[in-house]
Each structure stands twice: as structure tokens, then as C-alpha cells.
Image: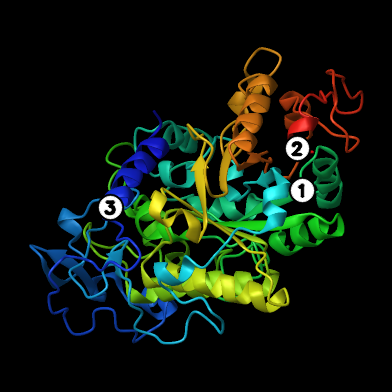
Amino acid sequence: MRRREFCKLIAAAAASAAVPAPGQTDELAPSAPLDGFNTFTEDYAKFCATPADQRVFYALQDGKFVKVKLDEKNWKPTAWGNAPALPVPGGSWDGVPMNAPIPDLSGEGPYKPTWDSLMQYDASEWYRDAKFGVWAHWSPQCVPEAGDWYARNMYMEGSDEYRFQLAHYGSPSKFGYKDLCPQWTLLNWEPEELIERYKNAGAKLFIALANHHDGLDTWNSKHQPWNSVKIGPHRDVIGTWAAAARKQDMRFGVTVHQARNWWWFQTSHDASKAGPSAGMPYDGDLTQAEGKNQWWEGFDPQRLYGPKHPFDALPDISYVKNFYDHTRDLIDQHDPDLLYFDNSLLPLGWGGMNIGAYFYNHNLKTHGGKMEAILNVKQVPDRLAKALVADYERGLTSQIMPYRWQSETCIGDWHYERSLFDQPGEYGGYLPPRDLIHWLIDTVSKNGTFILNLPGKPDARITSSLSLCNWPIRDSGKPANRVERNTTLGLPRAFTAAIS
């Protein structure tokens, strides 16, 4: 089992046990939080610009809130994040209180940032009919062509990604993830042609990655200077995808993975223990001032990597507000039909709950009062399954589900991995089409929608992936009664019935 799957398995167990049911309050005895905890006094940019030895964090130790500062001598990086339940009124999630310290974040409309309120929701008919969608899980992590979680693992001495980094780019102390970002060029990107091919394959929904745990936004973000308009392709990737999909009358969705940046990218603040760069901090410790006369002058690396913090530090309120602002900006600019969080339930306490309510209210407003929104999260207890659409990453259910749900997988790794393409055999290391077809049929037959990720290379080419994947295509609205082969793409028409 890979580290990613193990982390999410642990998160699933925690979610099942920790989430209060609608109408139920947290049972932990509230304690008096310290002055300043969960009080918004400065934005995230200012917090990031504060010298590392001057930042004040909050932690829960022995059931009490304490102020903590960075202890360089005893510091170690966090992983996926395993924040404790907080003894505060209303409970908490991801180490963040559920009660927002800032009013009116959910927008105007019937939905409020509580599970009771979100239970009003019913999944839209368009999603029930879609059955099949395609996902472009693209970010600068595609540049090394070395698979998913490269940005985190390249800073972990002894990992395959670390060795790859040394061999191809040098020490992360001198050439870090920020330096890979400009190489995500998308020079050969043909979004309209790709969307047309996906539609011809039967997809009624297209989904694009808005940000990953690495922190870079793939649209013209108002709250993150590290974005695809200013760095890399110098294009609004989300906006371009959205326009191409809507031109083909396809629904459009976005995936948000940023909430884990607080924990996930702490490895960038470490240092090598051996070799020529031993003891030299990785580039996650760089400040904006150190960018003078560098290509990244004017950009603060702390906004990409996140501030270095104690192992048990709770997410700072400025970070939570920034997450909310990021995601609200994404919704306001691009009005997605589907919003997906790579998290157990809605992330970061009041931040995620308010975004969920805002997304529903905004969707009602932009669709004449008709609910068209699909909100995906993971590890959803059965008692909350009506409030949104549960997502099963690379998973299936054992029965027909009473509420709509989603399963997604990838033909290879989530970010492009060249070694899978290079493996011998008809499909190399990619998912065989027979398995893909069975996966789709199993999902749809149990009241689910199936999403397939086709990872792209750093210049946006995926043609070789399409031909190898050998996945089904539709050229009419009628079910095929025998397997035929399309001579243009080499794709069998075997599962047309499942998506008609």
C-alpha cells in the first residue's frame, strides 16, 4: 500500500468515529481558548512574511490550548495531518473550530454552515444522468514525469523522488519545487480538441485540478500569487478548460486539494543529512527578500510551501481564511458545476463548512433558484450522505447506494509517471481497458458516477496515453451489441450501454 492510500485509510477511520450527527454537538468539555486563538487579526500574506522565529502558533497539549513557537532543534515535518478534536463549543474539524469567528461567510440563501442545513440538499438530475466524466489532474508536479506527490517526496531524503531530484535537478537546497513551476509550460495544449475527444468518448462531465497540496493555483487567483497566469504556462488553465467544456455542452468541475498544504509541504523546510549539501536548509525556508535578482523576485516562497511550524501546531486562522478566500474566488470566477475536496468531509472546520454552504447558495443564485451543484468530499458517514456527494477514491461500494456517489480512478498515477508508459506490454503499466470498463459498469449500476483521470505531460500532451488506455468510445446514442474498434483512436465501443 502506498503512503497516499495509507494516509487516507487512517483519515477514513477518524472521520467515521469523530463526526457528530446532525443535531448533535461535540461532547468534549469546552476549555477556555487563549486570547487570540481563532481570532482573525492579520491576513495570510502578513503571517507568511513574519520571520520564522517570531510567528506565534497555537497547539492543544494535555487538553489545554497553549501558545508555541518554532523550536528548530526539535522540529520535524508533519505528514497528511492528524489534528486533534478541540474542546470548543460546536466541536472542530482538522484542528479548526466549526464556529466561524467571521460572520456572513456562507452567502445569501437557505444553506448555512451546519450539517443540519446541508441536509436539505438533493443531487441534481444532470449528475444522475452523466454517469461518466474525465479529469485532468495536472500541476507542475507533472514536470519530472515521476508520479504523484513528487513535490513533497523530493524533500524526503532516501525516497525515490529525492534520488530522482538529485540526479536530474540537483539538491532541493538549490533547486526546489518552486523552480519546477516555470517548467510546467503546456506548450502543446489543445484544450478544445481534447474536450471534443472526451465528449465523443461519452463523457458528459469534465473536471480540472484547481490546486494540489503543493499550493499553486491553476487560475488567475486573487489570493495566491503563485498561480498559472503569473508562473509556468501564463494561462488561466481553469478558465480555458471551462470555456472549452461549456462550448461542447459539457458540465464542468474543479478539484481543490489546498487544505492539506499546512501539513503536507512541511518537508520543504527540512535539510539533507548527508552529501555535499548536508545541513543546508531546503528552499522552503527562503523568504521573499531573498528573491532579489532571482527569477522569483517579488514572490514569497512561504506562500507556496507554507510557514514552517511546530509538529503539533493547529492551522493558523489566517491560513483557514486564506483557504476560504481561495476557494470562494474560484467559485465566483468560474461557477463550477462540481466542487471536489480531496479531504475527509469539508476541510478546516468553519472554513470548509462555510465554503460548502456558499457553493450551494451561489449555485442557486446563478441557476435561477434550481440546485445544480455537486459537492464531493471523502470518508462520508452514512448519516451525512444526503448532504453532498460522497467520493470513493479508487474505490467501489458493496451495494446499491441510496444517494448519489462518485468513484474515480486513473489510468496510471494521479500525476504523469513516465515509467508506467515505458513498461512492456500492450498497455505498459496503465490500467487495462477491461478493468476500466468493469469499474465503470460496477459504479453506474450502484447509483454512482465514474470519473477517469488522464494525466498529462508538462507540455500538455496526452495522445500516447489515450491510445494506450484503449478505453471505450461512443459515436451514437444507442448501445452497441458487439465490440467494435474505432480506427481513429483504437478504442472499443463496448460500454456504450452503461453511459447511455
Q: Is residue 49 above or below residue 301?
A: below
Residue 234 in view:
no
In this rendering, which labeled residue sits more in front, label 3 or label 2?
2
Identify residue for label 1. Answer: 204
Report x, y in % for residue 218: 63, 60
The residue identified by callout 3 is: 82
Assess disc 3: are there few (<14), some (14-19) or many (≥20) residues with their C-alpha within 10 Å of its C-alpha.
Answer: some
The one of 276 and 93 positioned closer to us in this rendering = 93
**SS state under label 1:** loop
Residue at the disc numbered 2: 499
For the C terminus, the image quarter is top right
Q: Is residue 112 shown left or right of residue 335?
A: left
The structure residue drawn at horizontal position 41% and vertical position 67%, both measured from the top left corner, is 115
Q: What residue is at 92 percent from the left and 23 percent from the top?
A: 487
Of 330 and 336, nearer the camera is: 336
Looking at marks 3 and 2 on the same chain, the residue that comes earlier in the sequence is marked by: 3
Q: Position of residue 494 (x, y in %)?
A: 79, 24
Q: Amino acid at mark 2?
A: Ile
Real-space CA distance between mark 2 and mark 1, rounded to the nearest whole angstrom: 9 Å
Image-quadrant location for residue 433:
top right
The image shows residue 436 at horizontal and vertical percentages of: 65, 27
Would you place residue 314 above or below residue 36 in this image? above
Q: Amino acid at mark 1?
A: Lys
- Secondary structure under the numbered disc 2 in the rendered image: helix
Crowding around mark 2 (Cα neighbors within 10 Å: few <14, some 14 to 19, many 20+) is: many
